[in-house]
Image (spheres, rainbow, N blue to C red):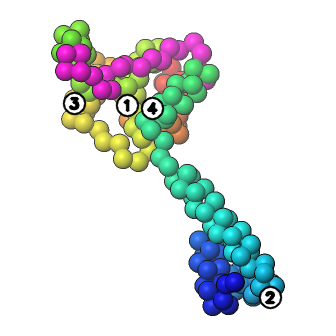
Amino acid sequence: MISDTVFKDALEIAYKAIGMTKAQRNAFIDIDMKSPIHQRDRILEIAENKAREHQATKKASKKVRSEFEEQAALVHWFRKTYPDIWIYANRNGGSRTPREKVDQIREGVLAGVADLFAPGFMLYIEMKRTKGGVTSDAQIAFKDHVKQFGYSWILAEGFEDAKEKILMFVEKRINKT
């Protein structure tokens, strides 16, 4: 059997973890304290399970999608939105053996090349995660190089940012003609 003090303290912790206000916690604890002693273990177990579920949901909602996930979502959206405009990925990243790196450099792989290219729009897209993505000096140099030849280049922090910037880019392009 759980003592009143231990039961009350444990409920306070569990209800606080769920995100209840002080007033809500007090109201629920008052109700739970009136429960028969033989039911307190079960009540506490339910409260603790709800707190664990809440914390897991909170953690999952804070997870930042990878650059791959953001880019895949963008390509899917782009191809549905602009079916007549090609978009493709430039495979510069990823892990490779030292031998593969040398071979790919000899084949023409170049550091800094943007992740995606839409030739019909003359548009390069550099994708980053919504949080934590860093643009390298080589990527900035690539941007500067292609812009001097009339290509456009956008830096997008995640799918939503990329989508918004592409829509603005297309709108400006339409209004110019």
Can you say whether 137 is above or below 54 in the image?
A: above
- Type of secondary structure dominating the magenta stretch: loop
| Crowd tier of the residue under label 4, counting other residues whose Cα lies within 10 Å: few below 14, some 14–19, many 20 or above | few
Per the rendering, the mark at residue 34 is 2
Per the rendering, the mark at residue 138 is 3
Region rendered in magenta: 81-100
Location of residue 113 in the rendering, given as x and y in whole percent from the top left corner: 29, 23
- First in residue order: circle 4 vs circle 2: 2
Per the rendering, the mark at residue 126 is 1
Residue named by callout 4: 68
Can you say whether 108 is above or below 142 in the image?
A: above
User: Of discs 1 and 4, which sits in the foreground?
Assistant: 4
The answer to the question of whether label 2 and label 3 lie on touching residues, with beta carbons closer than 8 A, is no
Q: What distance separates the C-alpha of mark 2 from that of mark 3?
A: 67 Å
Q: Is residue 84 magenta?
A: yes
58 and 44: which one is in front? 44
Q: Is residue 116 left or right of residue 44?
A: left
- First in residue order: circle 2 vs circle 3: 2
| Crowd tier of the residue under label 3, counting other residues whose Cα lies within 10 Å: few below 14, some 14–19, many 20 or above | some
Q: Secondary structure at mark 3?
A: helix
Q: Give the residue furthest to the top.
A: 107
